[in-house]
Amino acid sequence: MIYKVEFEISKKELKALPSYILVKLRRWADQVQSLGLEEVRKSSGWHDEPLKGNRKGQRSIRLNKAYRAIYIIENDTLVVVLEANKHDY
């Protein structure tokens, strides 16, 4: 089970996010660390989905309609958040 979350995002990038987005990202990370990624994925509110194309192997969660976080799973034990940004539709 995966219970550890690390951020590869720099502190500068995190500070650039709107505060309500940062709160939601931290809430997701807290849930993963307390419940496990498999349980959190069951919640439809995060819209956890695998990505395609040049992002194959990565997954995303929706933080709201405009923002999403991209993450990968390393060694079946760790979630690494690569970025959180405004999604281009």
Image (cartoon, rainbow, N blue to C red):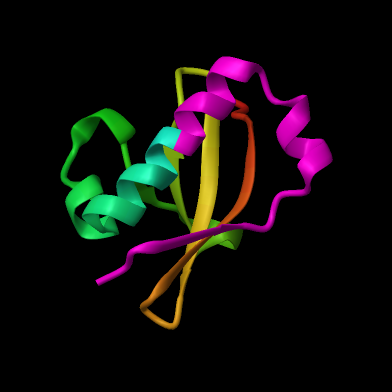
State the image coordinates of residue 52 (x, y, percent, origin top left). Answer: 47, 56
- The single residue placed furthest to the bottom in the displayed view is 75
Q: Is residue 2 above or below residue 39?
A: below
Is residue 88 found left or right of 56 in the rendered image?
right
Q: Residue at x 17, y 52 (%)?
A: 39
Q: Residue at x 34, y 64 (%)?
A: 3
State the image coordinates of residue 51 (x, y, percent, origin top left). Answer: 45, 53
Q: Quadrant of residue 50?
A: bottom left
Q: Quick check: can you spot residue 37?
A: yes
Q: Is residue 29 above or below residue 3?
A: above
Q: Quadrant of residue 88?
A: top right
Q: Quick check: can you spot residue 57?
A: no
Q: Quadrant of residue 12?
A: top right
Is residue 63 found left or right of 36 in the rendered image?
right
Question: 62 or 5: nearer the eye?
Answer: 5
Residue 9 lies in the magenta-colored region? yes
Residue 10 lies in the magenta-colored region? yes
Q: Is residue 30 above or below residue 59?
A: above
Q: Residue at x 34, y 47 (%)?
A: 49
Quadrant occupied by the N terminus: bottom left
Q: Residue at x 21, y 58 (%)?
A: 38
Total number of numbered labels?
0
Quadrant occupied by the C terminus: top right
- The single residue placed furthest to the right in the displayed view is 12
Is residue 63 found left or right of 54 in the rendered image?
left
Q: Which residues are magenta?
A: 1-26
